Image (spheres, rainbow, N blue to C red):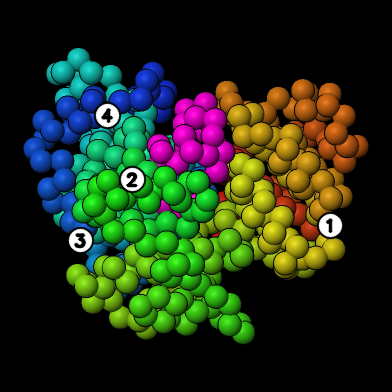
Amino acid sequence: MAPRLKYKNIDFLNHLGNADKPSLANIKRILKSFGDINKDLGIKIAITGTNGKGSVAKSLSTILKNSGFKVGLYTSPHLFKINERIQVNDKCISDLELDSYIKKIIDKQNKFNIKLSYFELLTSSAIQFFKFKKNDINIFEVGLGGRFDATNIIKSDISLITNVGKDHMEYLGNSISKIANEKAGIIKKRAHVITSATGIALSIIKNHAKLQKSEIYEYKKDFIVNDISDSSEYISDKKIIFKSSLKGLHQKKNLALTLKTCEILHDNFNLEIKKVQNSLSKVKWKCRFQILQSNPIKIVDSAHNINAFNNLIENLDYYYKNKKFIFLLGMLKDKNPINCIKKILPYSKKILLFNINNPRSINIDYIMKQDISRKIVKANKEDFISYFKSNNNIIVTGSIYFIGEGFKKNQKLLG
């Protein structure tokens, strides 16, 4: 048997950390050395927000791909393998391709004596890969915030802002207004802006759009999705009745943003309503209120912050009123874990806390010392699958890193 190839550039990437200070200067210099940053990227779509970015990106990518277009999709984080973050028409970049494109960027940074962060290096590689592929449309999920995120090097034609909540406050600020200002930084001149933000965040986003002379479309004012019988109805300049494979009440807003984007793109691509409807019934986005089994109930939901836990609770009240669950939970310590745990206590028989192989993992011993409830139990990661397969109603939730670790040797369980 031939020896397994060692992808040393991917390995180099995996050992990098975050940027020391927010700036686009380094990534701009690197990418400009390859030529026009935005050339050959087709229509460019940027998506930011506290929650829902990935669901919007994936549903939009599915619709456009099934409509016959070549679509690049850049998302984060990944579930099992880094390659998941860079896709063209649902096909992940290969190890060989990824290693090759990372090397191109590393060679440039060595030449200029520049050190890119993990996300800057990966984003640069994705952009160069998408340019080579000459995609019709490229969708970029913002990693963190917007203004100084590496993806903001792109001049997006459409900017989507799902919502604004208190997350990543150590980087974005400790108020909704500060966080909204960072996220609104993705808005480009004379572009389209679509948002489901509310309150002060919406006011700030509208102000940014006005300054950039960009047209803005607001959820509930310019477009909406309503429930009708066993289907949903999108209402804007067009009406579309559809059924979605994505479960959860919170997905209505996400799908509304997706469909408004399709409506704007229709002028360029003449999207057929039947293909849009068919695509929405087939979107696959793992670990987003994913119902794997109904008896006993098995749900996997990557609720990683307080806003996502609010969505989870809303869905449990709607779909499973008066049901109790065993929660398998692993979180990062900067995501307000104690308040998240308190949210799910009334819905739990037991909450099993797991460590994550991440320096930001929750400190389980610290949480146990808070004496919140006797329902909370420290668990070993070796017991994850046996708990999951038990004859109990189970919800696996928390960080996507935790879910990926838990199912890594049993990936088929996620469908």
The residue to which callout 4 is attached is: 24
Name the secondary structure under disc 1. Answer: loop
Query: Is residue 387 shown left or right of residue 212?
Result: right
| Circle nearer the viewer, 3 or 2 | 2
Name of the residue lying farthest toward the left: 35
Dot 1, how many residues are within 10 Å of its Cα: few (below 14), some (14-19), or many (20+)? Answer: some
Query: Is residue 408 shown left or right of residue 24?
Result: right
Q: Residue 175 magenta-drawn?
A: yes
**Residues in magenta?**
161-183
Name the secondary structure under disc 3. Answer: loop
Q: For this rendering, which residue is in front, 221 or 95?
A: 221
| Circle nearer the viewer, 1 or 4 | 4
| Circle nearer the viewer, 4 or 2 | 2
Name of the residue lying farthest toward the right: 374
Q: Which mark is residue 136?
A: 3
Give x and y (percent) for residue 200.
50, 46
**Mark before the other along the chain sequence, 3 or 1:** 3
Label 3 to label 2, Cα distance in Å?
28 Å
Label 2 to label 1, Cα distance in Å?
45 Å
